[in-house]
Image (cartoon, rainbow, N blue to C red):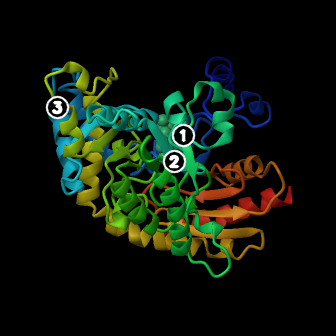
Amino acid sequence: MSASLLQRSLSAVWHPCTQMKQHETLPLIAIKRGEGPWLVAEDGQRYLDAVSSWWVNLFGHCNAHINQRLREQMEKLEHVILAGFTHEPVVRLSEELAALTGHALGHAFYASDGASATEIALKMSVHYWRNSDRPAKTRFVSLAGSYHGETVGALAVTDIALFREAYAPLVRAAATVASPDARTAETGESARDVAIRAAAELERFLAEHHHETAALIVEPLVQCATGMAMYDPEYLRRARALCDQYEVHLIADEIAVGCGRTGKFFAVEHAGIWPDFLCLSKGISGGYLPLSLVLTTDTIYQAFYADEVARGFLHSHSYTGNALACTAALATLEIFRDDNVLLANEQRASWLAQAAGPIAAHPAVHHLRQQGMILAFDVEATPGFARRFHAAALAEGILLRPIGNTVYWMPPYVLDETLCAWLGARTLAALEKALAE
Ligand SMILES: Cc1ncc(COP(=O)(O)O)c(C=O)c1O
């Protein structure tokens, strides 16, 4: 049964981010059900979902509370067009998110996936400047190694060659400035020094290009897809001040780092700043349903509020503000409150750090780093390491997908001390196996 399902998948399903030919040697895994942090395969094998299924799952698979809320909502309303209509879940979610920003970002615009949220922020920024009689401000700047999604518009601010090269003729690439990646510290430099150095480069760029620059877009604190590049919050403080000084919007892409992942609900809170646009997706629905949104300020909102239709933000997606997705998000926020998740994650993050101790001591491991519920390390290894490690980890019962030579944990917020220790021991075993091959 399982084998035929795999065959049917290979012939009918074009899998994402995959060179399909590699499945000639690395078989697909068919998952039958999820139980908390575990994925249970058709053949009964269990895998710890240590990457939260592409960084989306926060409170485990088949979470009883989210399931219950979804069942209740399903009996009332599954979806309604959000143009000209509204509903309780989308209103409550918008209000609750605004409250989480202290009402600094009081207007929520919805879409379904992360890349669309990026595009909405980019479009809103340019349209704001047009509505404000500054039509020359149409360019963007992002950080070296940035990742903000893979649609054609989002690729403009994504600086990862593998994802962009084939589509270069379609993309109007943004400028890039130095990443404040703490690993680039020179001898005697702290992470904060690196942040200050990178911010100085940003200042030079903005001094020269602010007339045509609409926005700077950043992944606050952790540039995830480039390989968990972590940096000091001082960069965000300086970027905020520079954006104010040069009249450039600051877009915080919190699609991966939002929802408690870095230790605070929003990663920008570590820097004590708010951006002009904040993009959220992935964890906001608890990993249940596609949902993304952009939060923005009253100043931005007011620039679109006018008699002329064309001054409005006319962007739309069919499933904008889907009632079930918003309900999953509300249930997710309930769990954050009821279980005091941010506090519990401080303990959980320290269990992860302890579990990583023996890994840090391995001679092939460098730059072991952590920001809240993200822990990563780089491995000195021969080419093909990522695939070898992925396969070795699966054999140990863990789902881990290294990015190049960077191995990372980004688990759901449900692991206890024993499971963290288990994850550490199994990851080390997989590392030794992958290095020996
Ligand atoms: C920082 C960041 N922005 C945007 C995206 C794109 O989100 P999606 O895959 O839902 O389009 C991702 C996805 O990994 C991301 O990490």
Q: Return the x and y of residue 436 as percentages of the image width and height.
A: 85, 60
Q: Which mark is residue 142?
A: 2
Q: Return the x and y of residue 9 as percentages of the image width and height.
A: 63, 23
Quadrant into which the C terminus falls: bottom right
Which amino acid, mark 2? Ser
Q: Which mark is residue 305?
A: 3
| Residue 37 seen from this side | no
Look at the numbered disc 3 and give the secondary structure of its residue: loop
**120 in relation to 393, above or below:** above
**305 in relation to 415, above or below:** above
Q: CA distance from mark 1 to mark 2?
A: 7 Å
The picture quadrant where one finds residue 213 is top left
Which amino acid, mark 1? Ala
**28 in relation to 230, above or below:** above
Kindly indicate whether the residue at mark 3 contacts the one at mark 1 (C-beta within 8 angstroms). no
Look at the numbered disc 2 and give the secondary structure of its residue: strand
